[in-house]
Image: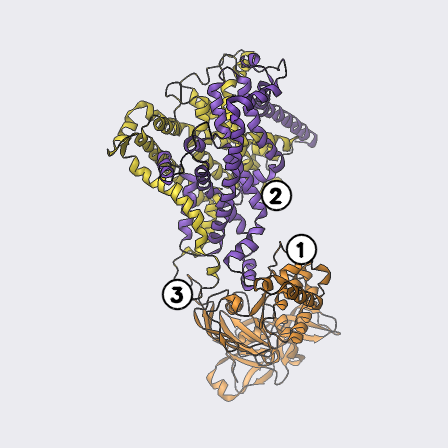
Chain colours: A yellow, B purple, C orange
Amino acid sequence: MATVIGKARVEEPAAAPVKAPRRKHAGIQSHYPFWFYLPAGVVYAVLFLVPTFIAFYFSLTRWGLFSQEFIGLDNFRQFFNEPGLLQGLKNSLIYGVITSALKVVLGLLLAVLLTSQIIARGWLRSVIFFPVLVSTIGVGITFTILMNPQQGLINKTLEVFGIHGPGWLTNPSLAIYSVALVDVWKGVGLATVIYIAGIVSIPRDYFEAAEMDGATAFERFRHIILPLARPATVTVIILSLIGGLRSFDLIWAMTGGGPGFSSDVIASVIYKQYQAGFYGLSTAGNVILFFAVTLIVLPIFWALNRKQVDM
Amino acid sequence: MNKAGSRASRYWLGGAALVVTAVVFVVPFIFILFMAIKDRKQSSLLDFSLPTSNNLISNIVEVIKSRDYMLVTAFINSTILTVASVAGMVVLGAMVAFVRQRRYSRWNRLVDLLVLSGLIIPPAVVPTIWVLQKLGIFRTLPGLILIEIAFGLSFTILLFQAFISTIPKELDEAAILDGAGPFRLFFRVIFPLLKSVVVTVIVVQSVFVFNDFVNPLYFLPGDDNATVQLTLFNFKSQFTTEWNLLFTDILLITVPMLVLFIFFNRKIVEGMTAGAVKG
Amino acid sequence: MAGVTFDAATRVYPGSDTPAVADLDLQIEDGEFLVLVGPSGCGKSTSLRMLAGLEAVDDGRILVGDRDVTHVSPKDRDIAMVFQNYALYPHMSVGDNMGFALRISGVGTDEIARRVAEAAKILDLEPYLDRRPKSLSGGQRQRVAMGRAIVRRPRVFLMDEPLSNLDAKLRVQTRTEIAALQRRLGVTTVYVTHDQVEAMTMGDRVAVLKDGVLQQAGTPRELYDRPVNAFVAGFIGSPAMNLLEFGAEDGGVRFGGATVPVERSVLAAHPRLLLGVRPEDLEVGDRGLPVEVDVVEELGADAYVYGHAVLDGGPANVVARVRGRSLPAKGALLRVAPRPGSTHLFAVGDGARLG
């Protein structure tokens, strides 16, 4: 998806400055009227652009139920000084990195497996993809039970092998990782189908040529699939990073940010401060999330897309 | 490696993959089903076990009845929300994608930037509520519909744009020579050709909107007009001892997605992976 | 009906320095079939699209009849166009495709049906009116595209390589059909192609373009017999005219053992010359330029001999047509000389015709 944009840009070197003189009849351009942008533009501007911009101002105010005053950067100072809030930022980063890394690795492996000649291929693809379509809250509740330290299926199973399972969601240093694993469970299907689409689109000639050259299965993976599925990797990384950094519902359904603040992420901090009536602080969280996402995703987007153009 | 050997290893690899996948991806759904069948007492054990008695029907009836038929209201609300916002996305998104793809202009880069922003930037919660309040549509279904449209437009535009680029421009030109104005060109000639991608957009965005939890939580709070995802959350605090009912609710709101998936599997996968391949 | 006039029409694409079409002056008579021909990128399609109104005119004027249409929107120019890929509306039936323009302009349903039926009859499309374009063969689709243009009864037909998506046999057949149809309807037609055979067989007149500049416009016979420059000479005719560079000598150029006489004034101004001679104008004999045979292409009645000769400027390829019975073998040495009066002379630098 993200690569669609990259492509559009490559396709149009004509984005050079226009110097054609303006005339009464400019070809057929008038048949593509700009007012077609209007309805979408209004909805988008009013409900997305305007709030995004005023967020910068709101984040500089103390704003409760009854009053609003300008306090400069105090909200941000508070954010970075209170361990409970700072933990949210850290957790968001951990969560984003872990989920996207695991989705890339597992998605690619599953895709390679599911494009080879194995039995029940179609069925497996469907089964892996289906969780993508299921309610996140539903998944969260289900796994909360499955991860229950005493009765949960996961620890019961581990017990069979003589392992004493941890308190997945009750151990403060483990909770965020456990939720991330569930996120991967739910989302790896999308990564897999993106990779499958990428692998399927590689021309068969390459594989046949490699076979003629006597390449082993691993060499085919290393030298053909891996480099040529690069656009898919870009998409998976960017999609999972965007999703992971702003993730809220799964964490909220499973731990509510707990125990304590141990599994809070920025998005849950935003919600908690909003509920508590600290609107300015909540919006400061939004601004921080904005910077976190753009500063991490945009450079990756540009770096990966540029290399891809060179290829 | 000889042929027989490779076939055997394939067989074992497939078998192993089948078993592992089944365990990892199917067991949670079986668990949901089992919990929804169990009675209250057995479900409170939280373990993975065969139900001792079949209570599925009575559980469903009880879930539907609870809180004054909240789930029924929620299904109606979610349906209206999904249909209206997806319809809005399709029409508005296709119009933007059409002009963006066909017309060469200095605005193209700005449009691209805005589309990209809509994909990446997380919406700011409190300021959005503030705007909704100023417009008098906070806590209303129309307000939430517009929100879903605003947030879903970017992805919709990308899907449409990629598709429109495959329609030969000569078709536009033929229509223009035939005397079609912008409106007729779009709605009579181009839009009918978008049928297959429209189906994709509808299915994919329906999944997103129907499963959306965060936006209803913020912009449509309150039990009166809950959406299905919020019922889960509300029930979770209410049914702390009635796990069977909570899981019946999960089961009920998963069924529409399962139906959608069975009928539109290919379209969904196609839409969600669009553009990833060809780059 | 009306003629068409390009009056110094120019098109410069945004972001480009050189014009795609530069100062095009061309007068097309009422009812005439004019073919625009040239290699790809020569500006022939752009010229056609300027006339259609699909491309802006940056300078100059375009007239249909006496009316200046330079700034008129495409639909008001009273023209119809047949596209290379036909551009049929996939979601409409064949009948609806042909009637779409009429419906837009508010013509009554009965009248639309009558005119569509009429066009369908001319084009043998009657059994297919309710079908979708997708279910038709390439040739049928091509005819639907023609029908869509005919139904509108425009003052000018525009055709942009309408045959290039057909297979070779069908192309030849359709070529004659289109030419016959145009003569029957008598509608002014501008036809774009890159295929010079198509241009020569179909057009009342042919206009050759290169790099956005009109080289020559004239009847096929004029272009063949008196090309104004080396480019037109080489472009028109297949196999192409032999263009051989010689140094001028006393009284003419020495073609091996033979001498081709050249006017004294021309010789004085041009120490070196391009001598053009068509393959069928080369005669095999005892005197003349020695040519070593590389390939012989047999066509039955006669054959083309492809070989190479050594000139003072270096080796050059030579093609000659010979009778089909006694063919030279590969590697044989022939002596060829032009039939008297059949040669063309061009300047070496700009290729302009001399004399």
Indicate whether B201 appears above or below A89.
below
Q: Between residues B53 and B158, which one lies in front from this camera angle?
A: B53
Residue shown at the point (63%, 13%) measured from the top left: B52
- Label 2 sits on residue: A204
Percent position of residue C120, x then y: 69, 65
Q: Amino acid at mark 1?
A: Arg
Q: Between residues C153 and A235, which one lies in front from this camera angle?
A: C153
Percent position of residue C182, x then y: 64, 73
Q: CA distance from mark 1 to mark 2?
A: 34 Å
Tell me which numbered mark, 3 or 2, is placed earlier along the sequence: 3
Q: CA distance from mark 3 to mark 2?
A: 48 Å
Q: Between residues C265 and C112, which one lies in front from this camera angle?
A: C112
Q: Amino acid at mark 2?
A: Arg
Element at label 3 = loop
Element at label 2 = helix
- Label 1 sits on residue: C132
Q: Are marks 3 and 1 in contact (CB under 8 Å)?
A: no
Percent position of residue A133, x then y: 54, 32
Indicate whether A108 appears above or below B157.
above
Name the chain under label 2: A
- Label 3 sits on residue: A21
Name the chain under label 3: A
> Relative to B152, is B15 on the left or the right?
right
